């Protein structure tokens, strides 16, 4: 049976980053991906901040970045706040392949079409059974997405609350703002979530929705109809859904010999549902800690818990964004309309991303409605 210091299961943003960091730290590392390719294997809006590429140590060159994008957030009455902070619409498959290439340069072995079927922690090693064989490792990093086999094998039953999403890639669109990613809020548009139009250019766009307690397809089709001036002649060339874990981190990310990261662990920013940046950051932290622990021969839960320290800034952001989401989900459309009048672009960025939410809370504290409903909940 072949033995590795670290085996990473899953080649999404979390997994390729964990494999890279583990290889960089000098550990003998294997990356397993069940799909035929390292690529975006599930639907994704592909919108990221500039900092995402910095974290990934990937240059924003045209083979990855489709275009630069600003953001527009629409209230239910279609009044909007423009957010000028530039981000990117990326080709996520290329981004993952670039990080996988970095991992390969650090000596990581990459196996595609190899699915982890079972993971068992035993005295002296952790065994990973796949469709092609069996391996031993000192540490396993579970980066295998929301329906994680690693988590299930270890008896982890807790899952972050999911929001079901559905996304069409539409062609022959007439997108009005091809350089903007647009978010649409409102209980009639997307109860418990939001709808989005993320254009690749004026003709091609990712058009999607996340809703809670409501049929996603019905709401997405109604949304497409509502924007018939832009989407009326468009056709769907890709039609897929997937759950996004927006309920925050699960309780136990670390066990003896195992670290769970990415969607498997709930590392998505709850209010935005964005998980690429936070998964890459989780991967880099987990890969480094797993490799150091494996090389030192101490792979206990206590040692691997150093992951919590390294990942703390993100843990704080996820918690804060979750608090804001819980407060906002109680608001009706009139209150959301009012909020859009009061908040600046920086306020929205801070609230959504779990950044300086206390500053925004202080600003809202004087307001009769929000002082009780929002400020109390987030402070
Ligand atoms: C519709 C939609 C739109 C989104 N839009 C955005 C966006 O615009 N911006 C953003 O930041 N985030 C977005 N997200 C969230 C983001 O895509 C995820 O949070 C992120 O991809 C999570 O990364 P991950 O590596 O943890 O998991 P995943 O991306 O799910 O990757 C897991 C990988 O593991 C592999 N795998 C699974 N099981 C096994 C196994 N047993 N053995 C081997 N391999 C296995 C899978 O094939 C997959 O490649 C979106 C999500 C959805 C559903």
Image: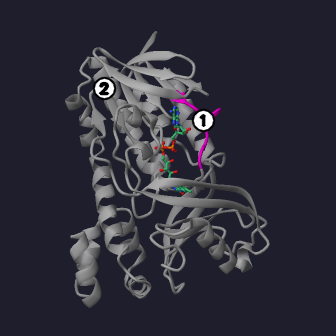
Q: Mark 2 or mark 1, which is nearer the start of the sequence?
A: 1
Residue 280: x and y in percent read 44, 43
Q: Which of label 1 and label 2 is nearer to you? A: 2
Query: Gap between marks 1 and 2, in whole Å?
Result: 25 Å
Q: Is residue 212 magenta?
A: no
The residue lying toward the viewer, choosing from 180 and 264, is 264
Q: Which residue is mark 2?
A: 257
Whether residue 35 appears in magenta in the rendering, the answer is yes
Q: Ligand 1 within 8 A of label 1's CB?
A: yes
Q: Residue at x 33, y 28 (%)?
A: 290
Q: Which residues are magenta?
A: 32-42
Q: Is residue 107 left or right of residue 325?
A: right
Location of mark 1 (residue): 38
Residue 256 in the image: x percent, y percent? 26, 27
The answer to whether residue 200 shows anywhere in this view is no
Disc 1: CA contacts within 10 A as few (<14), some (14-19) or many (>=20): many
């Amino acid at each position: 049976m072949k033995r590795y210091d670290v085996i990473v299961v899953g080649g999404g943003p979390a997994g390729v980053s964990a494999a890279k960091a583990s290889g960089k730290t000098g550990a003998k590392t294997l990356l397993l991906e069940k799909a035929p390719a390292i690529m975006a294997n599930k639907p994704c809006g592909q919108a990221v901040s500039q900092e995402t590429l910095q974290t990934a140590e990937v240059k924003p060159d045209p083979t990855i970045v489709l275009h630069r994008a600003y953001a527009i957030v629409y209230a239910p009455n279609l009044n909007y706040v423009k957010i000028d902070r530039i981000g990117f619409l990326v080709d996520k498959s290329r981004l993952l392949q670039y990080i996988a290439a970095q991992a390969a340069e650090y000596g990581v072995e990459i196996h595609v079409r190899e699915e982890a079927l079972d993971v068992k922690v035993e005295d002296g090693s952790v065994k990973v059974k796949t469709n092609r064989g069996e391996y031993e490792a000192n540490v396993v990093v579970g980066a295998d997405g929301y329906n994680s086999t690693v988590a299930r094998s270890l008896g982890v039953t807790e899952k972050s609350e999911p929001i079901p999403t559905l996304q069409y890639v539409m062609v022959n669109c007439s997108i009005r703002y091809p350089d903007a990613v647009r978010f649409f809020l409102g209980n009639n548009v997307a109860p418990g979530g939001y709808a989005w139009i993320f254009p690749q250019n004026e003709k091609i766009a990712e058009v999607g929705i996340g809703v809670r307690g409501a049929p996603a397809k019905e709401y997405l089709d109604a949304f497409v109809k509502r924007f018939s001036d832009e989407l009326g002649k468009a056709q769907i060339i890709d039609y897929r859904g997937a759950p996004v874990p927006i309920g925050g981190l699960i309780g136990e990310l670390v066990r003896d010999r195992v670290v769970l990261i990415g969607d498997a662990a709930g590392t998505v920013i709850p209010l935005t549902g964005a998980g690429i940046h936070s998964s890459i950051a989780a991967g880099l932290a987990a890969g480094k800690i797993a490799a150091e622990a494996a090389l030192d021969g101490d792979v206990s839960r206590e040692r691997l818990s150093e992951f919590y320290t390294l990942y703390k800034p993100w843990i704080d952001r996820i918690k804060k964004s979750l608090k804001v989401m819980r407060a906002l989900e109680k608001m009706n459309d009139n209150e959301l309309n009012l909020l859009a009048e009061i908040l600046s672009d920086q306020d929205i960025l801070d609230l959504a991303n779990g950044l300086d939410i206390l500053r925004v809370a202080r600003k809202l504290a004087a307001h009769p409605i929000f002082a009780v409903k929002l400020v109390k909940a987030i402070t």
